[in-house]
Amino acid sequence: MNTIWFFGDCITKGSGCLVEDRFYNPSKNIFPTIVCDTLDYKLENRGIDGASNEWTLNSILKESVNFNSNDIIVACNTTSWGFIQFHVKRNKILSINDPYYMNANEDYYNSKEEKKVYSDYRNIRKKYQLELDKFYQDQFNSIEKFLSIKSIHMLTWSFYEWYSNADKYETITKATNGEIRDMHFSYKGHESMANHILGLMYDKFSFLKKPLN
């Protein structure tokens, strides 16, 4: 059985709908699982909270040694103002993207001085967002071309799909009428995203057979 590998941020990870989350329902699935179940593929989900494009691209490259011929890579490019940084106490590289966590969590930074620098850096990146979007999309496209040489298929979808269509993808906040304040997808939102991703895959990959109904 071939594998679909998912790369992206908290939306791909399924944050808010995971076993440790208050909204978790074991009878429901997040969109990567729905996609794999529908197509009868094995699932590998490499989404993480706060993934920047640098993090996602690096993750694809690191995992590429594990890809097999006819596997499918589904990657989400995300906001271009996210970034990676080295965290001294944790002794590792962290990826930071979501503005709330960037501003509210002191422990993401090594010092208040560095937090100020990174905040200014984020604002500069936002200023040139469109140019950076193109830069990262070119990188995703280059990886896709390289993987195709090994008969590995890749689809990149844009975070703008849900970022610019908030009403299309139900959030946990909306699903619970505000009882749980969480702007990640509800299970209904994940179903909507699964349908979107499947549509993109059927259009791009002729070897996938779209159901008749």
Image: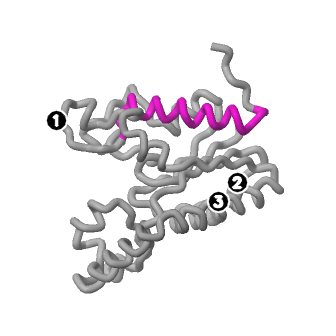
Tally the marks: 3
Residue tagged 3: 140
Residue tagged 1: 179
Q: In which quarter of the image is residue 60?
A: bottom right
Q: Are marks 2 and 1 in contact (CB under 8 Å)?
A: no
Q: Residues within 10 Å of mark 1 (few under 14, many from 20)?
A: few
Is disc 1 placed on a helix, strand or loop? loop
Magenta segment boundaries in residue numbering: 185-207
Distance between mark 2 and mark 1 Cα atoms:
41 Å
Residue 208: image x %, image y %? 73, 31
Q: Quadrant of residue 36?
A: top right
Q: How crowded is mark 3: few (under 14 residues within 10 Å), some or many (20 or more)?
A: many
Residue tagged 2: 67
Look at the image and tell me in which quarter the N terminus lies. top right
Earlier in the chain: of badge 2 and badge 1, it is 2
**At x 41% / y 77%, what residue is drawn?**
85
| Between marks 2 and 3 in the image, the one whose residue lies nearer the viewer | 3
Q: Amino acid type of disc 2?
A: Phe
**At x 24% / y 39%, what residue is drawn?**
22
Q: Relative to residue 138, is residue 50 drawn left or right?
A: left
**At x 33% / y 31%, what residue is drawn?**
25
Q: Relative to residue 130, is residue 103 drawn left or right?
A: left
Distance between mark 2 and mark 3 Cα atoms:
16 Å
Q: Do the residues labelled 1 and 3 touch (CB within 8 Å)?
A: no
Name the magenta segment's main secondary structure. Answer: helix
- In the displayed structure, 197 sits above or below 158; it is above
Q: Amino acid type of disc 1?
A: Glu
Residue 203: image x %, image y %? 70, 34
Nearer to us in this view, 50 or 62 = 50
Q: Furthest residue to the bottom?
A: 113
